[in-house]
């Protein structure tokens, strides 16, 4: 049998295992191990006496993956950014931010939901992990929305969708991981995420206001805050702006001369400042311990998927599937734009069954070079390119599109991490409830992605000035 | 026979000898023996020796300095200021060490055999700010340099700073490091030359040694014709590699001119001073360390020196 | 909290083993969390040392790479205990009684087989980097400052072995539920039943009534 055929069979097997309720990480790992065994035994001509040898090589090959792949500086951002989310919660920063957002915008139709979106967007400027953002706001925003009569599914959906913003608005673990996989300038990519992230937030807010105007039973507006109350709410939210300020100053150094460090270090430094604030605000060992345990749990969940998926990716490498796929994509005789749209649609489908980081690790090594080739190569000028932008700009634009797809992946059923996390915080909500509540936001995300494709300058004007 | 070959990154000058090898042996055996070269699909760079040992693939490229304890004998080739001046000399010293019984035994622990080197030029600095054109000015310089080269810079007061190759550009842009030591192709690939202002053209502190290795059982299982095809193609593959690398040198000079990067040429006295500070102490320390493990360090070092002398005749 | 479900306890041997193992799992998870914290502190020390004293932390990247396996592996069984590793439960969620436990049993058995094989595979990976005859027992080291890699490679088989024990307990729990036709077995994560869910919702609403609004 051809290795590629084996690749397709095993991929089918993995899908069935996932559908039957096997944990995604273990389904991917099992598929990878079965596939590797198959590949090696195929190489031995299916000689029964060499089956055990094939198993041995497969197991040893798979056994390298977990340690080799998680020992990575790039991935170290994920747990750090998760921890910062919990620490900010215990420091009362998120609560203050939500309160301020509430007083300023909750008079709008769907006010509290709009406030939640803007609060998550603000928090996204400190947090680089979507799951942690969703987990924290599930505790703060959902109770308040339920109190004034929101549908609980929709309230959960708002938080799950708002949480995704943390991956686009800098800092962002996913953007950094993209930059490192494709070897592009991290600083520029992070900068590029700012406008599309805010843009996404506005699209979410418009959607909520529209729904609130159409559906009479929607949660009521919250009015009656005086201007004094509004301004009073700002000082408690200062610490969060202070942390944002520190990160920006650290990375971009507006005072001239060299910056003080890399974006990676900026994120860690921000986390440390938040930790100090939490201690100052009276965080005790029990709370700190809870923050650590919850960080450990989310990290274990994400990293298990990462190495599980990468065992499967290793098998795909031996089956030579990436190579075949890349040849196929670049050989298609249709407009590059249509191919790009197909690729993004494929991401939407794949994202249903994958977690965001696993999906990027699985696809980018193949898809990124193919997309760059579609545009005319790494060093193409804007004039000669297919998408009307130079090679480096295309790398940024595609990165933002992919990260938006990754955010989408966090809320699409059946495997949408943010929805799982929100349901985990709220025992009264099942995962299916959250998925139902988040559905309207699919429309918002589709609109955002469409606009980012149609008007690339939304993404590119900021980084092109830098 | 089809061999899987694990390399990493993209196809580039650094992998051209393997591509050429495939071309040659495929032609010589009429397609009976081919290499299936995978760029990153089969293993991480640092786990290539593990993959060879397991038998997951038959051939791979490794870099000694990525995992010194996996291949202590090969790190003799990464000592600072050995005095290698060009790629041909690098090939000569590498081959001499690869044939040494201690190195053969070292690689046998991984069920591996050394096939051929991937000769790399001396690492040199691309830096930002005022050119550090004397040793004195290197005092306090934060430099991205690993292994023996990093140690060497430390002896003149520079501060070796860990950043990954992929983060090198950002690290330099953000002032985390003042300079980065790479071979030319890596300065181009990781774009350090895009923001650098100076280039240490003749400092030549040392390099990284990256052989191509094979699984021993797979090699022994080849037919005589296949083995002949393989062995007889090595020299031509290396010659091709050196020719391709010549293009990199040419491109390098153009890029330096285009980007307005200052070429720093160190005075012979400066280099002699650097060598005196770095070469001897680090070598002595290395030999002592090898002796502690029962590896004939002095002998390996002498092998390098006599090969170098022979290559210059 | 990430997708956690209830795990019931009683005085049976199985339940006591479950609780005992959970204690160990929790300690390991806490170590994992502390490693995350250490990572953050390490970054601050590195940045501070570099900017204030021109003395960057030697081997900063090497240390990060050493810490990552602690974070990635040590919490794995703790997370599995209450069903925290994500999965698609649309189909399984429709099952009830014996059919449900049987489905859970099958995927748990496959998971156990996978983990046992990976204990073997990751142990081999560790063993290749370990050598009693070498200094620091090291046959594989980090790139910058030459830290031995075997301790961090050893974490994988250790954590996977503990997960295998966890899987054994869950298999026992599910098998018992299949055999005895239990509705609420101990020592396994329970997908909340519709009734229990409704009850909890009612409780939530009433607690809101009593609340401060
Ligand atoms: Na963010
Ligand atoms: Na999804």
Image (spheres, rainbow, N blue to C red):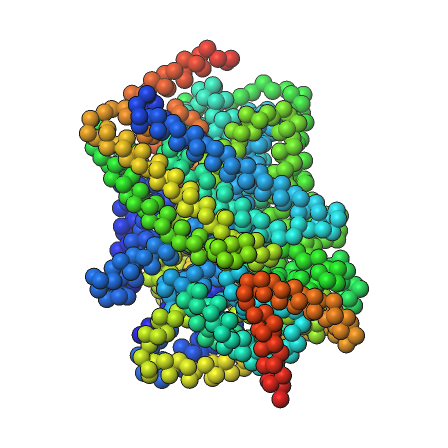
Would residue A265 appear left or right of B100 to someone viewing this image? right
> Which residue, as the protein is rendered here, is positioned at the far top?
C210
Q: Residue at x 45, y 75 (%)?
A: B115
In the image, residue B178 above or below residue C79: below
Q: Does B145 sit above or below residue A27?
A: below
The structure residue drawn at horizontal position 48% and vertical position 33%, both measured from the top left corner, is C27
Query: Is residue A18 rendered to the left or right of residue A144?
Result: left
* Residue B268 locus on image (x, y percent): 77, 76
Please state which of residues A263 and B228 is positioned toward the viewer in this rendering.
B228
Residue A442 picture location, percent across and down: 41, 40
Residue C41, position as x, y percentages in the image: 62, 41
A369 displayed left or right of B143? left
Query: Considering the image in quadrants, where does the C terminus of chain A appear?
Result: bottom right
Q: Can residue C54 be seen at all in this image of the molecule?
A: yes
Residue A129 makes an appearance in the image: no
* Residue located 31% across and 51% down the image: A31
Residue closer to the observer: A206 or A241: A241
Count numbered badges in the picture. 0
Q: Residue at x 28, y 43 (%)?
A: C110
Determine the image quadrant of residue B156: bottom right
Pick the quarter of the image with the N terminus of chain A.
bottom left
Coordinates of residue C208 in the picture (x, y in percent): 45, 15
Is B269 or B239 nearer to us in this picture? B269
Q: Nearer the viewer, residue A420 or A193?
A: A420
Give the farthest residue toward the bottom. B313
């Amino acid at each position: 049998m051809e290795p590629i055929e084996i690749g397709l069979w095993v991929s089918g097997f993995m899908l069935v295992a996932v559908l039957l309720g096997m944990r995604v990480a273990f389904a991917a790992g099992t598929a990878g191990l079965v596939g590797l065994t198959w590949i090696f035994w195929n190489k031995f001509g299916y000689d029964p006496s060499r089956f055990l040898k094939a198993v041995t090589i497969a197991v040893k090959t798979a056994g390298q993956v977990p340690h080799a792949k998680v020992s990575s500086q790039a991935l170290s951002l994920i747990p750090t950014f998760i921890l910062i989310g919990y620490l900010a919660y215990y420091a009362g920063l998120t609560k203050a931010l939500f309160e301020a957002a509430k007083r300023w915008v909750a008079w709008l139709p769907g006010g509290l939901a709009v406030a939640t979106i803007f609060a998550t967007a603000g928090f996204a400027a400190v947090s680089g992990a979507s799951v942690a953002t969703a987990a924290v706001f599930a505790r703060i925003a959902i109770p308040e929305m339920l109190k004034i009569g929101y549908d609980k599914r929709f309230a959960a959906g708002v938080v799950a969708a708002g949480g995704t913003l943390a991956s686009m608005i800098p800092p962002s673990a996913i953007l950094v991981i993209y930059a490192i996989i494709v070897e592009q300038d991290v600083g520029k990519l992070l900068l590029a995420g700012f406008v599309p992230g805010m843009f996404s937030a506005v699209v979410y807010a418009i959607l909520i206001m529209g729904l609130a105007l159409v559906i009479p039973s929607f949660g009521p507006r919250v009015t009656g805050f005086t201007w004094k109350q509004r301004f009073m709410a700002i000082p408690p939210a200062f610490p969060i702006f202070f942390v944002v300020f520190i990160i920006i100053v650290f990375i971009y150094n507006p005072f001239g001369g060299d910056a003080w460090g890399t974006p990676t270090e900026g994120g860690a430094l921000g986390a440390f400042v938040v930790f100090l604030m939490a201690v100052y605000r009276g965080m005790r060992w029990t709370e700190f311990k809870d923050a650590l345990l919850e960080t450990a749990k989310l990290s274990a969940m994400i990293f298990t998927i990462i190495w599980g998926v990468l065992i499967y990716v290793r098998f795909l490498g031996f089956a030579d599937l990436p190579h075949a796929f890349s040849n196929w994509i670049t050989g298609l005789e249709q407009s590059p734009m249509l191919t790009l749209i197909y690729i993004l649609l494929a991401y939407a489908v794949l994202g249903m069954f994958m977690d965001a980081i696993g999906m990027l690790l699985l696809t980018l090594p193949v898809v990124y070079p193919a997309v760059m080739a579609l545009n005319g190569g790494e060093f193409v000028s804007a004039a000669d390119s297919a998408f009307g932008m130079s090679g480096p700009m295309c790398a940024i634009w595609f990165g933002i599109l992919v990260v938006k797809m990754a955010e989408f992946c966090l809320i699409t059923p059946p495997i949408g991490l943010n929805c799982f996390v929100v349901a985990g915080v709220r025992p009264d909500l099942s995962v299916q409830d959250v998925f139902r509540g988040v559905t309207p936001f699919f429309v918002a995300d589709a609109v955002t992605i469409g606009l980012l494709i149609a008007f690339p300058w939304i993404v590119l004007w900021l980084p092109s000035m830098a | 026979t089809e061999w899987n070959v694990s390399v990493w990154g993209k196809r580039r000058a650094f992998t051209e000898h393997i591509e050429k090898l495939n071309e040659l042996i495929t032609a010589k055996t009429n397609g009976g023996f081919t290499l299936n070269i995978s760029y990153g699909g089969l293993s991480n760079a640092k786990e290539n020796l593990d993959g060879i040992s397991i038998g997951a693939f038959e051939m791979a490229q490794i870099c000694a300095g990525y995992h010194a304890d996996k291949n202590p004998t090969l790190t003799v080739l990464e000592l600072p200021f050995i005095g290698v001046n060009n790629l041909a000399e690098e090939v000569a010293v590498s081959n001499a060490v690869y044939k040494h019984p201690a190195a053969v035994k070292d690689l046998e622990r991984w069920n591996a055999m050394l096939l051929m080197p991937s000769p790399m030029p001396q690492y040199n600095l691309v830096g930002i700010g005022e050119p550090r054109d004397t040793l004195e000015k290197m005092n306090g310089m934060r430099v991205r340099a690993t292994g023996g080269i990093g140690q060497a810079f430390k002896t003149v007061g520079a501060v070796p700073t860990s950043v990954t190759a992929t983060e090198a550009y950002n690290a330099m842009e953000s002032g985390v490091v003042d300079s980065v030591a790479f071979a030319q192709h890596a300065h181009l690939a990781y774009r350090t030359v895009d923001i650098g202002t100076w280039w240490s053209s003749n400092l030549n502190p040392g390099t990284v040694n990256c052989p191509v290795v094979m699984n021993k059982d797979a090699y022994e299982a080849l037919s005589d014709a296949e083995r002949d095809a393989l062995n007889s193609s090595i020299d031509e593959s290396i010659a091709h590699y050196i020719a391709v690398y010549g293009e990199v040198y040419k491109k390098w000079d153009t890029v330096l001119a285009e980007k307005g990067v200052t070429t720093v040429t160190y005075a012979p006295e400066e280099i002699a001073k650097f060598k005196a500070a770095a070469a001897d102490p680090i070598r002595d320390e290395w030999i002592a360390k090898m002796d502690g493990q029962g590896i004939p360090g002095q002998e390996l070092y002498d092998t390098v020196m006599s090969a170098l002398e022979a290559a210059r005749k | 909290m990430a997708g956690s479900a209830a795990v019931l306890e009683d005085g049976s041997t199985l339940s006591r083993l479950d609780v005992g193992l959970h204690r160990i799992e929790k300690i390991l998870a806490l170590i994992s969390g502390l490693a995350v914290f250490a990572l953050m502190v390490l970054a601050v020390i590195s940045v501070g040392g570099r900017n204030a004293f021109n003395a960057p932390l030697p081997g900063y990247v090497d240390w990060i790479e050493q810490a990552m396996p602690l974070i990635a592996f040590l919490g794995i069984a703790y997370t599995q205990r209450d069903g925290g590793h994500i999965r698609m439960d649309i189909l399984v969620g429709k099952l009830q009684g014996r059919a449900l436990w049987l489905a859970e049993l099958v995927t748990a058995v496959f998971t156990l087989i996978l983990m046992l094989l990976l204990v073997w595979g990751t142990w081999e990976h560790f063993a290749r980097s370990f050598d009693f005859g070498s200094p620091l027992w090291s046959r594989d080291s980090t790139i910058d400052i030459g830290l031995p890699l075997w301790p961090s490679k050893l974490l994988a088989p250790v954590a996977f072995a503990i997960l295998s024990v966890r899987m054994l307990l869950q298999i026992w729990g599910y098998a018992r539920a299949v055999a005895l036709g239990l509705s609420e077995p101990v020592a396994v994560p329970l997908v909340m039943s519709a009734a229990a869910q409704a009850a909890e919702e009612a409780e939530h609403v009433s607690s809101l009534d009593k609340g401060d609004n």
